[in-house]
Amino acid sequence: MMNKYIYKGLVPTRKGFGEGLVELGERNSNIVVLGGDITGSVLTSYFKERFPDRFFSIGIAEANATTIAAGLALSGKIPFFASYSAFSAFRNADQLRISIAYNNVNVKIGGGHSGITVGPDGATHQSLEEIAFLRTLPNMTLIVPADYNETKKATIAAGEMIGPAFIRFGRSAVPSFTDENSSFEIGKANVLREGNDVAIVACGLMVWPALEAAEELSESYKINARVINLHTIKPIDSFTLTNAAKECGAIVTAEEHQIHGGLGSAVAEVIVKNTPVPMEFLGVNDRFGESGEPDELLNYFNLNPKGIIEKVLAVMKRK
């Protein structure tokens, strides 16, 4: 079965975030953005240039920015605050938990430069744990879009929903393959490729390698893999995952994140409750990252089509 999604070149997901903010700002005058001294890196600079009177520079003070965002939300605004995920999910962890989640205020957090593909910045900046933390926060919506188009849609969707949301995106250019007109719904996974031998569930930049792996599995191993883009980690699409378990009988998860507590753990919680089947997990296994170029690091940690294929072959033996 051929992949109906077409490679359209390399585009950073952060560009989708920046452009999504501008479109939101044009639609709704209550959208405001807070910057953390790295507006050019996470591309909140797009919004700053278009709506300077609705942009507030807080400086290198993530906890303050998060609390200010909560106050703006309680005043009727729809605030976005963005920084590197290592900072916007952890340096303000207490404020995320109490000021945002506990009070269930309408604040949106952008987590840029996530995963190991921050590259040369090294382990201190390679956020590999925020999915595990954020999905435990009551009221928090957590989105991990796959490419530029999907990040733009996710940003707009987050701005139009009510309640706290975190959008995880990256710095490096990654394959762009989804259509700008395809559907995106928070909490609803997209089945990108049909198949009944095994289901590959991926999020973020691992979705394209999952599609590549599925094609290789079909051509070389006669294994017909279903590929599911689980762009929303919370709320999770239990229906699509349970159907995949029933119809495929085996699942492999792939993520640019720690295995413990991440996408794989979230999927396993659904599967073990509804339809237990053999599972394999591809991700970073209980260690910090290293400095290097993005592609070098992805290959070093086996976060590529080869790594997915190895997990599929392993789970098929257990099926």
Image: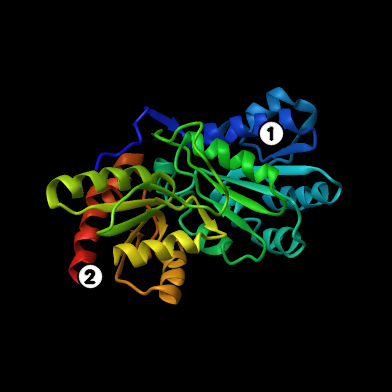
Q: Position of residue 112 (x, y in %)?
A: 54, 43
Mark in front: 1 vs 2: 2
Residue at numbered disc 2: 319
Q: Residue furthest left?
A: 220
Q: Which residue is drawn at 45% across and 50% down?
A: 126
* Residue 242, quarter of picture: bottom left
Residue 281 visible in the shown view: no
Q: Position of residue 101 (x, y in %)?
A: 70, 61
Indicate the secondary structure of the residue bearing disc 2.
Answer: loop
Q: Residue at x 37, y 61 (%)?
A: 244
Q: How far apart are marks 1 and 2 (CA)?
A: 46 Å
Which residue type does callout 1 highlight?
Answer: Leu
Residue nearest the observer in this picture, 238 or 144: 238
Indicate the secondary structure of the residue bearing disc 1.
Answer: helix
Q: Position of residue 82 (x, y in %)?
A: 63, 43
Q: Residue furthest right?
A: 75
User: Which quadrant does the N terminus fall into?
Assistant: top left
Residue nearest the observer in this picture, 287 or 218: 218
Q: In this view, does 162 lie to the left or right of 232?
A: right
* Dot 1 or dot 2, earlier in sequence: 1
Above or below: residue 286 compared with residue 211? below
Which residue type does callout 2 highlight?
Answer: Lys
Residue at numbered disc 1: 24
Check disc 2: other Cα within 10 Å, few if <14, some if 14-19, many if 20+: some
